[in-house]
Amino acid sequence: MITVRISDDSAAVACGADAVAAAFAAAGCTVDRVSSWGMHWLEPLVEIAGNGFGPATMADVAAILDGSSDKAIGPIADHPWIASQHRLSFARAGKTRPLSLDDFSAHGGWQGLVRARSMPPAEVVAEVLASGLRGRGGAGFPAGIKWRTVLEAPGPVKYIVCNADEGDSGTFADRMLMEGDPFQLLEGMAIAAHAVNASRGYIYVRSEYPRAIAKLNAAIALAAERLAPFQVEVRVGAGAYVCGEETSLLNSIEGKRGEVRAKPPLPALQGLFGCPTVVNNVLTLAAVPHVISDGGAALYASLGVDRSRGTMPIQLAGNVRHGGLYETAFGITLNELVNDIGGGTASGRPVKAVQVGGPLGAYVHPSQFHLPFDYEAFAGADALIGHGGITVFDDRVDMSAMARFAFAFCTAESCGKCTPCRIGSTRGAELIDRLCAGDPDQTDAVAALPQMHNARKTTRSRAEELQLLEDLCETMQFGSLCALGGFTPYPVRSALKHWPEDFG
Amino acid sequence: MHTDDLERILAAYDGQNGALLPILHDVQTHFGCVSPEAEAAIAKALNLSRAEVHGVVSFYHDFTAERDSRPCVELCRAEACQARGVEAMVEAARAAAGTRVRLKTVYCLGLCSVGPAARVGDALHARLDADMLVNLVEVA
């Protein structure tokens, strides 16, 4: 009997993996549904005795089984795309059945938790600190410092909250991890709970990820004994992008509007239900089991560059030839990622721009592709790494439309609490429309209202309109409560700076 | 609205911390909307004001005040799917949808490497072109 391994990751399923799996089963094969290797352009990827075939359709089944298929890619583990990675958080990707405790244990699962529980909490925190692990959600705050703050905070009840509200376009690493290796996330959360003396945890998952929610709930039930006394509960978001912001997420779990809270107080001191709370992204918590394994912290700290230590699961998305999940040490350049690993655009046309870090990330021009993947290097170039998503655009993209979309997205998703974000985003979209239309500013409907006595009556020159846009961006960047309003200027400014010809 | 069903949903979360969102999800799934009557009953059960419950219902995109029984096609129009050409397909999809099908824009289904992507119920679809999308809408 031939055993065929096919992923049940959402990306594979969306590309038809279920039908291919059914066809192999009908042909008499045993079909194991495993996690995805992350080579999404090859999904559905069929693995038989280590050899890969993809992208497979039902029509390929017979040829794959009789060895005549032209979709063969050879041994998957030796494929350059896989072999060149340094996988720590995604070490099990493609190799295990997501909900098999046996597979998980056989591939090193629970070792970190067992070791952590043999150590006093302060030592666990010290190891996380020594590893240099930083928050993978976007802000890059050192995880160890956050944990230490919670550990030292007074209070009988503390919480671990996993931020799985992965709303950024161009990112899917959280989803892949939750669907492909849910026990690893639970192990990381249990280690965090031990490190800060918390007994309860929540995973806040966006409602757009129903398969991840189902996997997590099943995994929690299967691993309950192993996790005890730590208890975990999945909470489902309700379609609000802003709930990926940690204080808004906490409000949402509490059953309130997902409005951002002012900081201080820090969530580490007064977080969920007013108690000290660790809020970490899925990738941060999933990195923890490796960091806490024997010698893991030192290995982690030895990878990467400067203050960006360890590995980052990078997501290649958009118009890219070889899209998927690529985990590697910090320091790799954008050029390597986009052109070598990603293979350029899927359309075969020249790359015009890449957006790094989701909807709030800057558009990076090919002339900046020497930038190393590193928090500080990106910050120095007025860009951000964010959650590690890279969205590639070919030369047909209109950058003024993307800048306008950034404002419009902010308008649609603003929680409404602070004015720069709530109103500034609308004014920004209007400004871009005026710039591109080349219209004088009388077209501003609000300024034309009779009660707007102080509105300017003469038309603005293009230079003045641009200055107005710059002022607006500055107000949003420094006046907003959270990153939604505060970072929306990144895509706008970068688009305007590098592609001014697209703006009218 | 069957009050028995609502009571059962409320009873399931009795005593749970921060139960409002899970309750609203269950109500939305079961009744297809969160009606003003349901808001009032939920408010009473959780010892909240109706305004507080309404504020939460109206904040989140997933909750609706009125039931829409049309089939729904959720189309991702975020940056990654835009980069793969989703915008050029929207007009044709709208035309195919007419008033019979609800074509809903979502921002990101997490299928950014294999877009354009759409979801119909629990079924995910990727690598769409205009014809495939129109077909999805037509059979929805």
Image: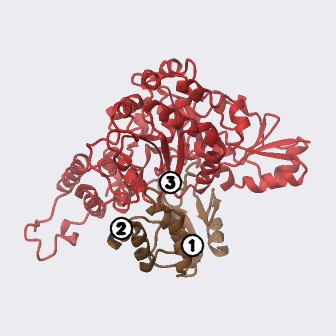
Residue extending farthest left: A453
Q: Position of residue A269 (x, y in %)?
A: 32, 39
- Looking at the rendered structure, whether the residues under marks 3 and 2 are on a common chain is answered as no
Residue A86 found in image quarter: top right
Question: Disc 3 vs disc 2: which is toward the camera?
Answer: 2
Q: Position of residue A378 (x, y in %)?
A: 37, 34
Q: Colour of chain A?
A: red
Q: Position of residue A228 (x, y in %)?
A: 58, 39
User: Mark 1 belongs to which amino acid?
Assistant: His
Q: Chain of mark 1?
A: B
Question: Disc 2 vs disc 1: which is toward the camera?
Answer: 2
Q: Which residue is mark 3?
A: A235
Q: CA distance from mark 3 to mark 2?
A: 20 Å
Please indicate, yes or no, whether residue B103 appears anywhere in the rendered image: no
Query: Is residue A66 rendered to the left or right of residue B25?
Result: right
**In the depicted view, which residue is nearer to us: A455 or A260?**
A260
Residue A141 found in image quarter: top left
Q: Which residue is mark 2?
A: B48
Q: Which residue is mark 1?
A: B30
**In the depicted view, which residue is nearer to us: B97 or B64?**
B64
